[in-house]
Image (cartoon, rainbow, N blue to C red):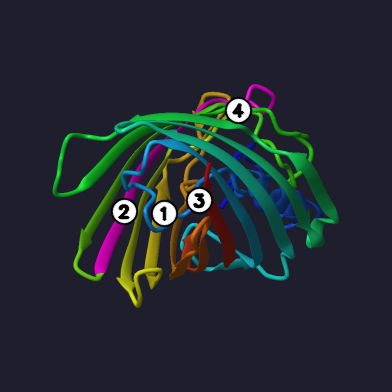
Amino acid sequence: MYKRNPQYIQETYNIKFLSHPLFRSSFVLVFLLAILPHIAFAVNFYDGARAKQGTYFLTYSSFYIADELTDKNGSLSKKDLGLSSAQELLRLCYYSPDFVATALIPFGYMDINSLNQNSSGPGDINLGIGYFLPFKQVDILPMIFVEFPTGEYNASKAANIGSNQYDIKPVIFLHKTFGDFSLDAAAKYFFRLKNETTGVLPGDEFYLQCLLGYNLTDKFKLGPSINWMISKNKEQNGVAVSNSARETLSVGADIYYRFSWLSVTFTYLYDVHTENSTKGHFFQLKTVYRF
């Protein structure tokens, strides 16, 4: 799912101006720039599992819709937002016995009906490398990703496919199988670097993601998923913006089926609690093909 981070309204305006409808519309636009998505997809079955040596092609077809925006306390601050975001993420991944290298190229369309804005095209490319730790009882894969600002960006718009900034993303994946059950988990820390156009340093983000699976057959499995994210306050021109930290808690489920030449995973997540963020529904269809 994507989250975007630009400039914030300064807090020195007086109460009369803050109450003006034109200001409120501008605040919504600027606030949305701070929370709309970048690549932070949910953990899926076998994300951190060792794989046979070779090259894999993965696709992530996702759709996110949200009509609600929340404040710092998790209360509704705007309804009828009309946010919809569709993305096709193409990923190439190489596995040696221990080393992993990957590239992710997104293409997307975003529309914010309440602001009459949309954006489409290629997004921000991510490159990553990792190496499995030498444990036999459990698969542990530390990786590091770098996100490059290759997507289209317009600082005056809330709807942007690109972020206009670099991100550095250390990630640790874990996979464990015990009988008919499996556990997939990930811990992620995103260092969000400065947007030079807006002068905004987005707040770093920390993710914990967990997926418990049960094998109904040797090819078919399903299970519940939980995702939690918390961020730091952002900075505008070197000054921290108080109460701008974000938090999301999403719950849902994954369904997995393996064909002889292709595996398919369907993911659904609902944002049960958010602070300073959108609150909506996430759908994803993932495919994995080995050359």
Decide if residue 124 is on the left or right side of residue 127.
right
Task: Residue 215: tell me if it is visible.
Answer: yes
Above or below for 134 versus 60: above
2 and 3 marks in contact (CB < 8 Å) = no
Q: CA distance from mark 1 to mark 2?
A: 7 Å
Above or below for 249 versus 29: below
Name the residue rendered at 46%, 40% in the picture.
Answer: 233
Res 188 → quadrant: top left
Of 253 and 96, nearer the camera is: 96
Q: Nearer the viewer, mark 4 or mark 3?
A: 3
Tag on residue 41? Answer: 3
Q: Determine whether the residue tagged by mark 1 lies in a helix, strand or loop.
A: loop
> Would you call the spot at circle 1 few (<14 residues within 10 Å), some (14-19), or many (20 or more)?
many
- On the image, numbered disc 2 is attached to which residue? 185
What residue sits right under mark 1 in the picture? 43
Find the distance from the CA under tag 1 to the CA under tag 4: 24 Å
Residue 247 in which image quadrant: bottom left
> Above or below — where is 114 with respect to 128?
below
Label 1 or label 4, whichever comes before in sequence order = 1
Q: Amino acid at mark 4?
A: Gln
Look at the magenta stretch and give its main secondary structure. Answer: strand
Observer-nearest residue: 277 or 172? 172
Residue position for label 4:
165
